[in-house]
């Protein structure tokens, strides 16, 4: 029995490794226009948020954090979540090409594509951070590995949400635009992309503290900037939400796969 279980685990690992390699190769062969558009969208949003902070609020920096890396850290966190969710939730529309491969499921493709998306997008984030340091827009980064790990956590949340939204987006196409596009904009304004928790009014803080993405963004800022300490955040709260969303995503994906009859062959 143990030998059978070990064989199953080794086969699953081999399948995932093959899918990750395939996704990397196919990503290199795709036109990068959509990805470039996402990066340009980040710069466009940075310009808008700079205007909001400098012109409307009369200040740029926040608690000693220069505005450019301050906004980069917030936006990359949210874009990591949004991009991964969008990519993973669209897998049922293109899964037909994989059904000829025995043993490959939607979950295998989702994990592989989600991980590749997260790694590539995190690479862009690191380039932005190091570029900001190199050109004098940012102070030295306090703990880059911690920044990367925390923002990859946002990608894991996006992976879980993508699994959850697979079925709704597959059956109701309009939901994708409403949730990914408009929901993404709402997340920017509610999750600390251009502010930190201490800047909120006292009347909003009791409600904002329930937002795990606000916790995550402040944790990223604390890991990036030596001048900021996020004493209010709860890493266990973020971890709990991450595990819960991934668990719910696995349940939803399995139920959806069985409903379509796309189980493991």
Image (cartoon, helix red, strand yellow):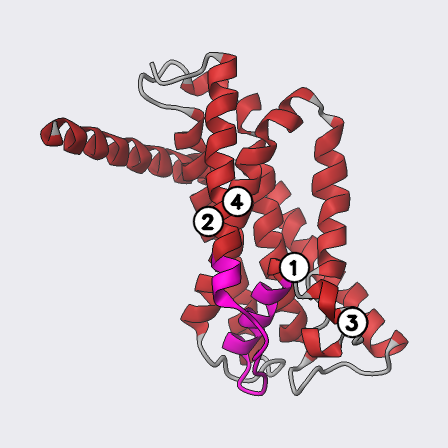
Q: Where 25 falls versus 140 (above or below)?
A: above
- Pointer 2 with pointer 3, Cβ within 8 A: no
Query: Which callout, 2 or 3, points to the residue nearer the camera?
Result: 2
Q: Main secondary structure of the magenta part?
A: helix
- Pointer 1 with pointer 4, Cβ within 8 A: no
Q: Is residue 109 magenta?
A: no
Residue of label 3 = 50
Report, in whole angstroms, how far the alpha carbon at label 2 lies from the one at label 1. Answer: 15 Å
Q: Is residue 151 left or right of residue 200?
A: left
Highlighted range, magenta: 214-239
Residue of label 1 = 211
Which of the marked residues, 1 or 4, is nearer the chain's N terminus?
A: 1
Residue 247 percent location from the top left of the image: 46, 40
Q: Residue at x 65, y 59 (%)?
A: 211
Q: Is residue 225 magenta?
A: yes
Please tell me the numbered disc located at residue 245.
4
| Nearer to the camera, 1 or 101 | 1
């Amino acid at each position: 029995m143990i030998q059978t279980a070990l064989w199953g685990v080794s086969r699953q690992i081999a399948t995932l490794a093959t899918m990750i390699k395939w996704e990397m190769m196919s990503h290199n062969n795709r036109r990068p226009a959509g990805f470039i558009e996402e990066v340009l969208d980040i710069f466009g949003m940075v310009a808008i948020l700079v205007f909001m902070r400098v012109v409307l609020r009369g200040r740029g920096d926040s608690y000693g954090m220069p505005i450019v890396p301050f906004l980069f850290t917030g936006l990359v966190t949210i874009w990591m979540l949004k991009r991964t969710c969008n990519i993973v939730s669209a897998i049922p529309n293109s899964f037909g090409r994989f059904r000829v491969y025995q043993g490959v499921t939607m979950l295998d493709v989702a994990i592989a594509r989600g991980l590749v998306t997260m790694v590539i997008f995190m690479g862009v984030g690191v380039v932005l951070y190091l570029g900001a340091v190199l050109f004098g827009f940012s102070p030295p980064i306090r703990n880059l590995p911690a920044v990367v790990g925390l923002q990859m956590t946002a990608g894991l949340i996006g992976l879980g949400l993508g699994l959850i939204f697979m079925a709704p987006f597959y059956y109701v196409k309009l939901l994708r635009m409403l949730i990914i596009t408009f929901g993404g904009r709402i997340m920017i304004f509610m999750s600390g992309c251009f502010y930190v928790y201490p800047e909120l009014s006292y009347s909003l803080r009791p409600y904002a503290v329930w937002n795990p993405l606000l916790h995550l963004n402040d944790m990223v800022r604390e890991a990036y900037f030596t001048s900021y300490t996020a004493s209010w955040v709860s890493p266990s709260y973020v971890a709990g939400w991450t595990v819960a969303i991934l668990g719910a995503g696995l349940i939803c994906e399995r139920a959806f796969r069985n409903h379509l009859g796309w189980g493991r062959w």
